[in-house]
Amino acid sequence: MVDLLNEKKENLVEETNNFEPMKDNGSLKRHFKGKKINESLKIIIVLGLIAMVASIMLAVVNFYTKIDENQQILDEIGSLYSSEISTTVDVSSISNYLGTEIKAYYIADDGANIIVAKANKGDKVCYNATGITIIVIIKEGLIEKVVSFSHSETPGLGERALREEYLNQYEGINTDLIFIPEGDFISTPEFNYFNPSVITGATYSSNGVSLAVKAAVKAYRSRGN
Amino acid sequence: MIEKTEKLTFKDITSPFTNGIINNNATFRLVLGTCPTLAITTSASNGIGMGLSVLFVLVCANAIVSILRNIIPRKVRIPAYILIIATFSTIVEMVVRAFLPDLYDKLGLFLPLIVVNCILLARVESFASLNRVIPSIMDGIGIGLGFTFSITLIGIVREFLGAGSFFGIPINSIISAELPMTFFILPAGGFMVYGFLMVIFNSVVDKIQKSLENRNRVNLGSRSVNAHISTPEIDTQGGK
């Protein structure tokens, strides 16, 4: 430590001895200004180069990993339903229902309505931010199938509401029995209507599924069915 | 810090790797990256997914920062490191979204948040910016594997106790009893499992290290005793 200090001291003395005074105050200012400009320029160039390389890399990765959500939905439907899709309904004309959205609406050759509905996270609806997206197949006024498409509900907890055994309760239910209140859908009583069971410990996720099914049925009714 | 002119020894390359897994274990020793650790370890597969994502970003960021360590000006090193880390975490996000959509949905917000994971900035700043490329890569692999191992372990315990499954396979098929205790899936259970595993990990590692130290001491002691016994003979011979 002492050696290091002595060495530094010697260097300092040497530097002081070798110091050549600037000609005048103005040139001293210019000297430091030039140094600062050089430093700033170096910073800008280095950061700019890193940013440029980063953006090129991201552009290349984006090109190869671009995903077509509609194609993903069509692939999933293809694995679920054997009949070919004949019509694609414009979903922009369908009004969204209580924090839900209709992501896609198709009509199959055999007349089945295939609706992809998403319930977004809201008050007592869905536990995780991604929300719940389900595929609802309705044929001749009856719900034929409800299948989970994507969600991020906690495994072993909310995820239980997306399992086949829970979603099966909607199969064969007449769409007329699905009550669609305009206000708070959770506290509105559903006497004489189909009352889906709610899983203990997965209430928010069950509500999410129920809301998405209601949104799909509402979209189905909006087409004059 | 290894000087540029020095030749890398085998130990220089392997020690960052083993340290990263055991002595500098990000989760159990350094207690870094606690937020994603508690949030995503509700299942073992989430743990592996998150761990491997962090591993990739860490290795790449460490390598690039180590290569550019003499070029990046000190004043703007943190923004430069963040830029590099953000690039790789965005690449991971894009790749996972495209090829593992289920995992992408489950990890949710925590995948893009890798960019602010303090493990990354800590290793880049304290190791990669001071060391050469190969040790930096080995440090990234070690720390990344240590993190993956830790959060997968936490995920296995939480999933087993909380959801009654192991990597998504229900345990009921193996054990007839109803296992799930939802508490362990919830944040409070996460803290508890994390704490218990941290105690177990540290006590086991400390015990192993102490026993190794004792063995070394015994070996050194026996060597010095042998030297002590043989010294007078040499001395007497030298004296004569």
Image: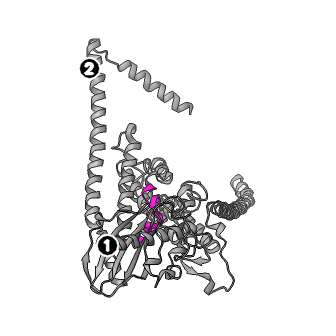
Query: In the image, is residue B206 part of the stretch drawn in magenta?
Result: no
What amino acid is found at the position of numbered circle 2 in the picture? Answer: Arg
Q: Quadrant of the C terminus of chain A?
A: bottom left
Which segment did they paint magenta? Answer: B98-114
The quarter of the picture where the N terminus of chain A appears is: top right
Q: Quadrant of residue B163?
A: bottom right
Percent position (x, y) of residue A35?
A: 29, 27
Q: Secondary structure at mark 1?
A: loop
Q: Is residue A47 above or below residue A107?
A: above
Tell me which numbered mark, 1 or 2, is placed earlier along the sequence: 2
Q: Magenta stretch: dominant SS? A: helix
Q: What's the residue type where badge 1 is placed?
A: Arg
Task: Choose between A21 and B20: the one closer to the eye.
Answer: B20
Residue A30 - label: 2
Query: How far from the left and from the top, in percent, is residue A128?
Result: 50, 62
Which residue sits at x=58%, y=62%?
B22
From mark 1 to mark 2, how far is it between C-alphas? 77 Å
Task: Find numbered disc 2 in the image and state the secondary structure of the residue it sits on.
Answer: helix
Count of marks placed on residues: 2
Q: Which of the 4 image quadrants contains residue A216?
A: bottom left
Q: Chain of mark 2?
A: A
Q: Nearer the viewer, residue A90 or B126?
A: A90
Q: Dot 2 surroundings within 10 Å: few (below 14), some, or many (20 or more)?
A: few
Image coordinates for residue B208, horizontal then vertical, percent: 67, 65
Up/down of B81 relative to A84, above or below = above
Residue furthest out toward the front: A192
Number of the label disc, if any, that sits on residue A223: 1
Q: Is residue A82 left or right of residue A189?
A: left
Residue A7, disc: none
Question: Subunit of mark 1?
Answer: A
* Image vertical order of residue B213 relative to residue A15, above or below: below
